[in-house]
């Protein structure tokens, strides 16, 4: 993987997590140094037991107009197809909620203030303006807030509780197999805890 001015033996591991259960439903590994092209294959790799995906919540590292268009156009879009009109987004596939820039991590009173949703973008608005409007509405803010409490704990558990911090194998195919085993191990652990909780209830 390209890193700075050189290359290093490293991989970019991805995981898609279902909000309610916090089970990993999609995983992948690439040798790309950033996430711009990982959303579309990540959604496509969702487990076949997932009948439908209503929304995709991603951070700014995954955002690109091309990726959002491909995911939201669903099966009807040709690979790599870019729909220029923002009105065509969310035609058949899941609705994407993506940060388009860095989010402020400091706490402020602004998120707690009651305020009306901003007006919808004008016809012909750019894709980034449409996305920014989505995240500025009350429903969009509430939905996007679920992302950090869904996927971030999963990676924290894999690294801290399970002790997996580096791949032991080399080569993309072998590493993908290793990441599959890690995701499977996490899911078994999570299912055990979900079962214990149900018994207690």
Image (cartoon, rainbow, N blue to C red):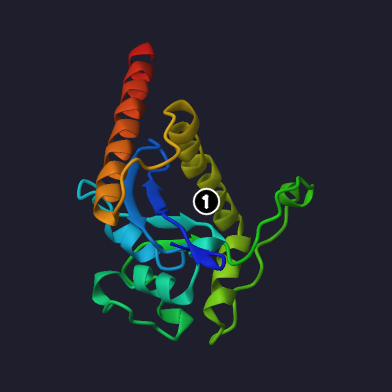
At x 46%, y 26%, the residue is 161
How would you rate the neighbour count of disc 1 (Cα within 10 Å): few for under 14, some for 14-19, many for 20 or more? some
The correct choice, above or below, for 128 with respect to 144 in the image is below
At x 31%, y 69%, the residue is 92
At x 42%, y 34%, the residue is 164
In front: 36, or 111?
36
In front: 47, or 158?
158
In front: 39, or 140?
39
At x 34%, y 40%, the residue is 168
Residue sitting at the far left: 48
| Residue matched to label 1 | 143
Left or right: 183, with 86 as reference point: left
Quadrant containing the N terminus is bottom left
Q: Position of residue 110 (x, y in %)?
A: 77, 52
Quadrant containing the C terminus is top left
The correct choice, above or below, for 78 with respect to 164 in the image is below
Q: Position of residue 5 (x, y in %)?
A: 56, 68
Residue sitting at the far right: 109
């Amino acid at each position: 993987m390209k890193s700075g001015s050189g290359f290093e033996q490293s991989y970019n591991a991805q995981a898609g997590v279902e909000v309610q259960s916090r089970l990993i439903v999609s995983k992948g590994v690439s040798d790309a140094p950033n996430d711009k092209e990982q959303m579309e294959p990540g959604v496509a790799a969702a487990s076949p037991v997932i009948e439908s995906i209503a929304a995709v919540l991603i951070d700014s590292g995954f955002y690109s107009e091309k990726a959002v268009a491909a995911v939201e156009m669903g099966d009807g879009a040709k690979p790599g197809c870019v729909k220029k009109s923002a009105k065509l987004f969310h035609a058949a596939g899941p609705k994407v909620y993506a940060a388009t820039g860095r989010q402020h991590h400091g706490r402020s009173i602004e998120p707690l203030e009651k305020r009306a949703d901003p007006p919808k973008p004008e016809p012909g608005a750019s894709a980034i303006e449409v996305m920014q409007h989505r995240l500025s509405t009350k429903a969009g803010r509430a939905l996007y807030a679920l992302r950090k409490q869904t996927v971030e704990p999963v990676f924290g558990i894999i690294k801290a509780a399970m002790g997996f911090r580096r791949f032991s194998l080399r080569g993309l195919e072998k590493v993908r197999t290793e990441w599959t085993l890690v995701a499977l191990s996490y899911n078994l652990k999570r299912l055990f805890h979900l079962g214990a909780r149900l018994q207690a209830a």
